[in-house]
Image (cartoon, grey):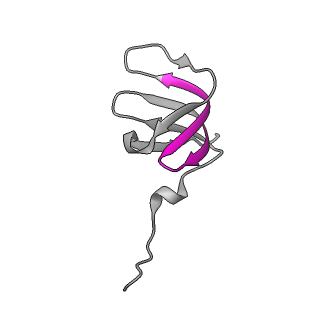
Amino acid sequence: MAVVWGWFPWRRTAVRRRVVVNLADKAFAGVLWAKRGPLLVLRDVTLMQHGAADTPMDGEVIVERSRVEFIQAVTGG
């Protein structure tokens, strides 16, 4: 039996950093608070949708990783 070790980009997700999580039809800007199995937990979130005003979200937002197109890590500057 062979064991294959490799680089897995999903293990390097920017936990406790400000991010923009892009889905096919919307995006969430906030702090990536935790990774729990197939879920991402975001706090201090703003919902961004094309053609609509940005909407602040109350509480935590849970996103299934399988729905994520890509994640942008926001840097200060």
Task: Point out the residue furthest to the front here.
Answer: 1
Q: Quadrant of the C terminus?
A: top right
- Relative to 13, say whether 24 is above or below: above
- Relative to 75, say whether 51 is above or below: above
Question: Percent from the top left, x then y, of residue 36?
Answer: 56, 47
Main SS, magenta region, reads strand
Residue nearest the observer in this picture, 65 or 28: 65
Question: Percent from the top left, x then y, of residue 68?
Answer: 40, 41
- Relative to 38, say whether 7 is above or below: below
Residue depicted at x 44% and y 30%: 27
| Tag count | 0
Task: Point out the residue furthest to the left here.
Answer: 24
Residue nearest the observer in this picture, 45 or 1: 1
Magenta-drawn stretch contains 33: yes
Magenta-drawn stretch contains 18: no
Residue nearest the observer in this picture, 44 or 4: 4
Residue depicted at x 61% and y 30%: 60
Residue depicted at x 49% and y 43%: 72
Q: Quadrant of the N terminus?
A: bottom left
Name the image quarter holding residue 34.
top right
Q: For this view, does 10 lie left or right of residue 77?
A: left
Residue depicted at x 43% and y 73%: 6
Q: From which residue to which does the magenta span run?
A: 31-47
Question: Percent from the top left, x then y, of residue 65?
Answer: 44, 44
- Relative to 2, say whether 70 is above or below: above
Question: Percent from the top left, x then y, of residue 47?
Answer: 50, 23
